[in-house]
Image (cartoon, rainbow, N blue to C red):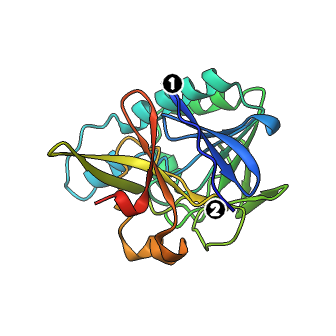
Amino acid sequence: MTEKVAVSNTSIGTLDIAGVSLHADLSGALFWEEQRLLVVSDLHLEKGSSFATRGVLLPPYDTLATLSRLAAVISRHDPRIVVALGDSFHDRTAHERLSAEDRAAVTALQAGRDWIWISGNHDPMLPRDLGGTIADEVAIGPITFRHEPTGAQGEIAGHLHPKARVAARGRSMERRCFASDGMRAVMPAFGAYAGGLSIRDAAFARIFPKNGFVAHLLGDRRVHAIAASRCC
């Protein structure tokens, strides 16, 4: 199946996955308009405080920054359902380190909508006191949402934090990206402190046969659709 990609001079592009058209938001979220469903992946809340416990000092503002960006994209699309696609928390006790203000922010984001926490490898035992529903995966129509990609058709997953580097006019640009071949997709990490894995890594070759996929780079003003074979 050929992937149809429409990119305009806006902050939203289009991904077709298994016949379903989704909006690729410049924030790194996907919005399924027909279902009014927003999906984000790998928030890694409280990564900064997790590093601090090991003596690696980072500015302790990642959770605030991530939740603020999430609030903005929720305001933009007004979803009926939000799916947090795993590794929402950086470790098993991260939710215990949330400030009262951040807990209140999570509650406010959930108001008036269904919220689904997908368990990830960093947060396999998700807390039950933060609202929402906990699941290992969710299937809606032809789409299955899960944390770790298997390469199955109709799958939207996270976990790998894809990023891509492209060279042009003697310069290179490296950005987070969606990776998709029209039948499956891997989402970029949404968290402020989440890192990235190059789409040239062997992990992506196991998901997308023959390198036949597209990197949808999150640029400054728009989503750039570039064949993976053109990426460095």
The local secondary structure at tag 2 comes to strand
Amino acid beneath label 1 = Thr
Q: Where residue 107 sits: x, y (%)?
A: 64, 31
- Left or right of 114 in this view: 177: left
- Left or right of 164 in this view: 150: right
> Where 202 sits versus 225, above or below?
below
Q: Nearer the viewer, residue 24 or 109?
A: 24
Quadrant of the image containing the C terminus: bottom left
| Disc 1: which residue | 10
Total numbered labels: 2
Amino acid beneath label 2 = Arg
Say which mark, if any, is on residue 206.
none
- The furthest residue to the left: 170
Q: Nearer the viewer, residue 15 or 104?
A: 15
| Disc 2: which residue | 184
The residue sitting at 73% across, 27% down in the picture is 111
Q: CA distance from mark 2 to mark 1?
A: 24 Å
Label 2 vs 1, first from the N-terminus: 1
Q: Nearer the viewer, residue 200 or 57?
A: 200
Q: Where residue 32 sits: x, y (%)?
A: 72, 40
Query: Do we see residue 217 in this rendering?
Result: yes
The residue sitting at 58% across, 68% down in the picture is 149
Quadrant of the image containing the N terminus: bottom right
Q: Where residue 21 sits: x, y (%)?
A: 72, 44
Q: Where residue 133 sits: x, y (%)?
A: 75, 49
Near mark 2 (Cα within 10 A), the count class, few <14, some 14-19 or many ≥20, is many
> Where 95 sits versus 197, above or below?
above
Near mark 1 (Cα within 10 A), the count class, few <14, some 14-19 or many ≥20, is few
Query: Do we see residue 157 in this rendering?
Result: no
- The furthest residue to the right: 141
The residue sitting at 58% across, 61% down in the picture is 181
